[in-house]
Image (tube, rainbow, N blue to C red):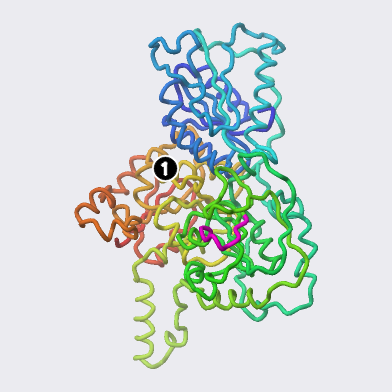
Amino acid sequence: MEGGVRHVVLSPGSRSQALALAAAALARRGDIDLRVRIDERVAGFTALGVGRESGMPAAVVCTSGTAVANLLPAVLEAHHAGVPLLLLTADRPPELRGVGANQTTRQPGLFAGVVRLEADLPVPAERDPEGDGDQTALLRSVAAEALAAALGTDEIPAGPVHLNLPYREPLAGVLPEWFKAVPVAPRGGNDRDETQGADLDSSPRFDSLRSLNDPREHSEPDPLDGMSEDASGALYQGGGGVGETDEPADDATLVLPRGPRTIVVAGADAGPDAEELAHVGDWPLVAEIVSGARYGRRLVHGYRALLRDPQLGGRIQRAIVFGHPTLSREVTALLSRPEVEVIALRGPGEPLNLNGETASVARVAVGRGAPDREWLGEWMRASRDASVDLAPPAPDADGLASAVPETRLGAIATELGVIRAPVDRAALVDAVWRASWPHDRLVFGSSRLVRVADAVLPGKKVPVHANRGLAGIDGTIATAVGVAIASQAGGASGVTRVLLGDLALLHDVGALLQPAAEETPRIQVIVGNDGGGTIFDDLEVAGVASRDDMDRVMYTPQSVSLAQLAAAYGWEHVVVSTRSALDQALTSPVRGPQLVEVPLER
């Protein structure tokens, strides 16, 4: 807390009771935001969401045994996505390990290989009434080191830290007076600066050497001139995963020479550097919906088909990659081609090297020389032709006002058809995208809908989160709740929307449980309910398996009443089946947790 940690997520248990009481005291003073979750997996992902949004780790407190093991999914995601996270796990003392003691396993090393720091601390041996004893000094030192490790450095990315805390009985007591006056760092609202990414001169991955050839200093005509630009522009682009590499990094800047036909690829958590490089280099930008870079005049619409086009994707000679691309086979195929020079900016998790020859670099800059305006122009014209407008057609005002009965009735029928049209997946993702703005947060689950969104949505500066480090189905709602808690801290405005499928919802249904004593954030869980896992319908298995086998082991049909589920957890439930009703649900005031169910055809 002295270092600035403001969020604690706690799962109750016997061995961790001293930590729990200390957290309760800090919360009562207003020094921390304390959230209690009975499920440790939910607690881990809630803390992950806080870290994603705020850039500061939340501390997870739990008891010993399987409680600790339940944190593993969130720890793995934090490692691969570079999200700061602090684990404070209570434990039995060393003499009770390995001798069959109750609720005891080997917790030290449980997360080895995926944590930035781990320590099995000494058992407290005495009380410290003044707060100046050696034990307290050691704990302060370890706490500072743990926070620094979780936040990462230029060489080591942010990520999870595990502090194992063994205790002997008695397990609780009266807090000393000095603890009641522990100083904490100044408290703010949302820890993440909402202008992040604006000062790109301080970017760790895009060097100021780009000024050697900033196209904004040229007088040559821009191939985009005359084309319409998406002006939905918000002022802030969110993201998550930060950091560099798991391996020692060479900090030298790679200057990218002109010449090769180049595109910029922005995968998950790429951030605004990818868009800036594309702008400065005058290169096409292929940006995933979860990249934090899906905006700007170099953005390519309909990129999947264009990458398959031999005259465009087939002629690429160099790809500069930011973040972790996961959403399309076309990008994977491109980055696997041995004849394409692939340069990947270092990030958390495993280094990208799909073609066996990918160069991993810490920083890049654009070299001198004239940009290839013909190459950019080809992509931008194809992008313009591939873009689609999914918005419902505007009413025919002239027809509706016509004095000719046939004309007026025809216009009315057309308008009623638009209003009553059922929602499909493309309309669903479009409605959610259009309803979200810079003060909101949008979280995508690892469902079919995120791939639909990636395929059809235009560019827009919206703070987007998604757990794409390992792209698991688990923890989506809990992560979104954590994002909402952090983004709405200090009374900040906005709604957190999470878009996911029905199976992702059911997998994380425990995250719907929100304690009555806690202030519930404004959150909409928007569920595309197609009765099972239709994401598998596009896989090879769908072409070889029988319908019965496909349904049983892949599609896994479900018929859960989401209305009853929402009522059981105290969430408002809204079911919508038309675009007009969906738009109304998304734009109406949200004052608490709300589940918006959208039935979809398989």
Q: Residue at x 65, y 78 (%)?
A: 374
- Which residue occupies the foreground of this view, 225 or 155? 155
Residue 77 position within the rendered picture, expressed as x and y whole percent measured from the top left = 50, 41
Tell me what residue is drawn at x 58 percent, y 78 percent. Answer: 381
- Label 1 packing within 10 angstroms: few (<14), some (14-19), many (20+): many
Q: Which quarter of the figure is the N terminus placed in?
A: top right
Query: Could you tell me which residue is drawn at 41 percent across and 37 percent down?
Result: 513
Q: Is residue 56 above or below residue 577?
A: above
Q: Position of residue 399 (x, y in %)?
A: 43, 87
Describe residue 530's horizontal placement relative to residue 82 as left or right. Answer: left
**In this orientation, does residue 489 appear?**
yes
Q: Is residue 441 visible?
A: no
Which stretch appears magenta? 335-343
Query: Residue at 41% of width from left, 58% of height from top?
Result: 449
Residue 305 spot, x, y in % from top left: 47, 70
Considering the numbered disc 1 on the image, is that residue within a helix, a strand or a loop? loop
Q: Which residue is mark 1?
A: 474
Query: Callout 1, which amino acid?
Result: Asp
150 is higher (above) or lower (below) than 137: below
Magenta span includes 340: yes
Query: Going by the image, does 155 lie left or right of 102?
Result: right
For this rendering, which residue is in front, 238 or 315? Answer: 315
Is 258 colored magenta in this rendering? no
